[in-house]
Image (spheres, rainbow, N blue to C red):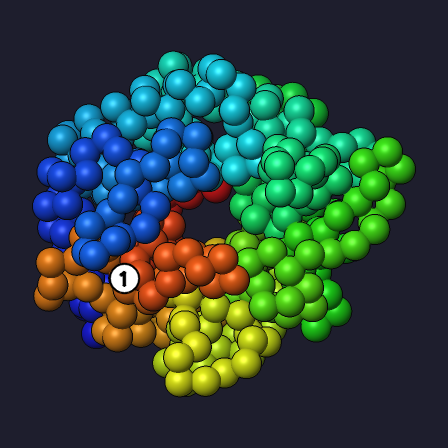
Amino acid sequence: MNSGEQWSNDTWERIYHKVKESSRRIGTSFPHASVDGVYDSMRSSWWTAGFWPGILWQIVADNGDTELQRIAEECELRLDESLYDLSVHHDSGFIWGLSAVANYQITGSNESRHRGFMAASQLASRFNLKGRYIRAWHDDKQNGNRSGWSIIDTMMNLSLLYWASETTNDPRFKHIAMAHADTVLTHFLRPDGSSYHILCFDPETGERIGARSGQGYSEDSAWSRGSAWTIYGLVNSYLHTREKRYLNGAKQAAHFFIANLPEDFVPYWDFRAPLNENAPRDSSAGACAACGLIELSKVVSETEANLYRNAAERILHSLDVHYGAWDSNEEGLITKGTSNFPGGTHINTPLIYGDYYFVEGISKLRGSSVHFW
C-alpha cells in the first residue's frame, strides 16, 4: 500500500467514526450549516436536504452499516412531505438523487425508484422550451416573476433526469437535460472557463436578456462553487451521453479552476473577488470540484488524467490536513465553507454539502465505483 492509499484509508476511517458519532444527534434532520459547532436543521424542501442521507449512503455502500442505513431511509420518508405537495424546485436532484436514487441503487427499493421518478418528472416540468433551460426558483416578493431565471447549480441536478431516462428506457428526460446542458455551454460557460451564476431569459421568446451576480462578487466574476458545479455537471452530462462537447466544456472549466487555485489548493469563495487577509475560502467548492476532476480523469488520456487526478488529490489532502475538524467538538467534517458571502450567510463554517463531497471524494480515491450522479 503506498502512502496515498494509506492516507485515504485513514481519512475514511476518521470520516466513518465521526459521522457515526454525529448521527446520534443529527438523526433524521436535514442539516445545512454548522452553527457554533452544531449542525442546524432545515425544512424538508430546503435544497440541502439530500446531502446528509447522501453521506450516509456513501458509507453504507462501503461497509453496510445498518444503523446509518436506517437513518437514511427515514430521512427519505420525511422528504415525502415536499415531494407530494409539489414544492420541488430546480435542486430536486440534490435532494432525491442522494436519497431515493441512492437507496434504489444500493438496495433496489421500488418505493425509492418511484420517488426518484416523481422528482424527475417535477424537475422536467420546469423546462422552458423556448429558452431551452430549466427554470430556477419560484417567484418571490423581492424579485417578482423569476420564470426567466436559470442558474449554474442546475447542472448538477440534471443527473436525476439522465437516471430517469436510463431506468425507464425513455429518452424524454435525457432530451431535457441535454437541452439545458447545451444552454450552459452556449450562455453560462465563458471562453476562459469561468461561468455565470444566474442568467435571465425572456420566458416567452427564450432570448437571453441579462445576468445577475447571485452568490458571486459581481455579474462577471467567477464564484468558485459555480465553477465546481460546472465542472462536475458537465462531466456527468458526458458520462450519461458520451457527447464530446460536454467533455470539452468540463475540461475548459477544470483548467480555469485549477489555474486559479491558491497555494494550498482550496479556493477562495470567488476567484475574481478582491483578495485581503479576511477573504473567505469555500471548502465546499474545492470538495465538489475534486469529485468532478476525479471523474474527468477517468475519461481522458493518461497525460490529462494525471493533471486532473493530481489536482483532486491535492485539494482533498489539503482539506483533510488544513481544514479537517477531527480534533474538536465540531460536528462538521471540514471547516471554512462559505454558503452565501454577498448575503452574509454561513461564512467560514462547515457546510453539509462540503462534507458530502469530501466524503464522496475520499471514497473515489479509495476506488469506490459508487456514483449517485
Q: In the rendered view, would you say 309 is above or below 130?
A: below
Which amino acid type is marked by label 1? Ile
Locate the N terminus and report the quarter of the image it occupies: bottom left
Is residue 224 among what the camera can see? Answer: yes
Which is nearer the eye, 241 or 289? Answer: 289
Q: Is residue 253 left or right of residue 15?
A: right
Provide the residue designation for mark 1. 334
Name which residue lies at 25% across and 53% down. 35
- Which corner quadrant of the image does residue 354 belong to? bottom left
Give the x, y percent position of residue 41: 29, 38
Q: Which of 298 and 210 lies nearest the eye of the viewer?
A: 210
Where residue 353 sits: x, y (%)? Answer: 38, 50
Q: Residue at x 39, y 14 (%)?
A: 110
Q: Quadrant of residue 185?
A: bottom right
Quick one: SS at disc 1? loop
Mark 1 surroundings within 10 Å by alpha-carbon count, few (fewer than 14), some (14 through 19), many (20 or more): many
* Horizontal arrangement in the rendering, residue 162 relative to residue 178 (left or right): left
Report the side of 319 relative to 327 (left or right). Answer: right
Residue occupying the point 83% across, 49% down: 208
Q: Could one spot residue 242 in this view of the protein?
A: no
State the residue in front, 208 or 342.
342
**Residue 294 horizontal/vertical position (percent):** 45, 60
Residue sitting at x 69%, y 38%: 144
